[in-house]
């Protein structure tokens, strides 16, 4: 991932589009967004790329994408100068690389000055659940946001990876053993139907 884009120092700029339009993307036309993990499990498993949107610590939606989104310097500058994110919101982009379908790449993250840690954490839990549904072996990412510490990554189950490369690369390995998401979070993120919740580890 380029757990990258953080607008905490971006200042108080005007948002160019109303909040309802922020979820619109040409690359998602014709793909129904997922808000119910139980009803739309097959969609989540089948789609190779998507955007997770969390807001105020809860899931807003997972939108599918026809093509992966990886971000680039031009997009970063656009986000920094013209598309300042307001509110407690996080957008997390992911995809399965061609030729490596057993892995997920967390490719880009947008957050704002008022994005809470709970909202960011919720987005990572949604990605963990998608990885479990897909049976993925691991999630990989590249962290460029200095506010995300190595200690925080380790606490959330990530290990440093490809130390010979420049930058901070991490991997979250599963290989059939997925982290147990606490029941309170499963309810909050609507992963299960009522009465079909997974037990919480104590």
Image (cartoon, helix red, strand yellow):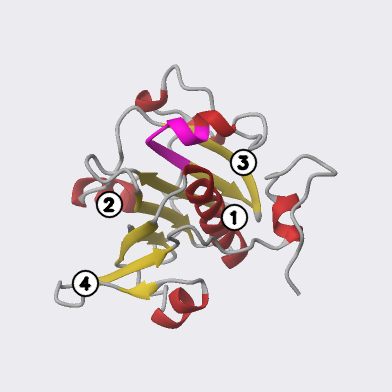
In the foreground, 134 or 21:
134
Q: Which mark is residue 60?
A: 3
What is the residue that sits farthest to the top in this orientation?
30
What residue is rendered at 46% in x and 22% in y? 31
- Which structural element holds mark 1? loop
Question: Badge 1: few (under 14), some or many (20 or more) residues near its Cα, within 10 Å?
Answer: some
Q: Check contact, mark 2 vs mark 3: CB within 8 A.
A: no
Q: Which mark is residue 76?
A: 2
- Number of marks drawn: 4
| First of labels 1, 4 by sequence position | 1
| Alpha carbons under labels 2 and 4: distance apart | 24 Å
Q: Which residues are magenta?
A: 44-51
Residue under circle 1?
88
What is the residue that sits farthest to the bottom in this orientation?
151
Residue under circle 4?
162
Which marked residue is nearer to the observer: mark 2 or mark 4? Answer: 4
| First of labels 2, 4 by sequence position | 2
| Alpha carbons under labels 1 and 3: distance apart | 12 Å
The answer to whether residue 22 is seen in the rendering is: no
Q: Which mark is residue 165?
A: none
Q: Quadrant of the C terminus?
A: bottom right
The answer to whether residue 182 is seen in the rendering is: yes
The spot of residue 56 in percent (x, y) is 66, 53
């Amino acid at each position: 991932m380029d757990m990258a884009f953080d607008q905490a120092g971006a200042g108080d700029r005007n948002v160019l589009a109303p909040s309802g339009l922020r979820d619109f993307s040409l690359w998602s036309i014709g793909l129904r967004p997922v808000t119910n993990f139980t009803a739309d499990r097959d969609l989540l498993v089948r789609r190779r790329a998507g955007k997770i949107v969390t807001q105020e610590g809860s899931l807003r939606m997972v939108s599918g994408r026809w093509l992966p989104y990886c971000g680039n310097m031009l997009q970063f500058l656009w986000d920094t100068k013209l598309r300042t994110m307001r509110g407690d919101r996080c957008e997390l982009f992911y995809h399965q690389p061609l030729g490596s379908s057993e892995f997920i790449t967390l490719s880009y993250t947008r957050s704002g000055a008022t994005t809470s840690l709970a909202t960011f954490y919720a987005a990572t839990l949604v990605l963990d659940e998608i990885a479990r549904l897909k049976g993925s072996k691991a999630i990989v990412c590249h962290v460029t946001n200095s506010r995300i510490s190595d200690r925080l990554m380790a606490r959330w189950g990530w290990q440093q990876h490809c130390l010979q490369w420049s930058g901070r690369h991490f991997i979250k390995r599963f290989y059939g053993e997925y982290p147990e998401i606490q029941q309170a979070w499963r309810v909050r993120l609507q992963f299960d139907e009522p009465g079909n919740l997974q037990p919480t580890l104590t």
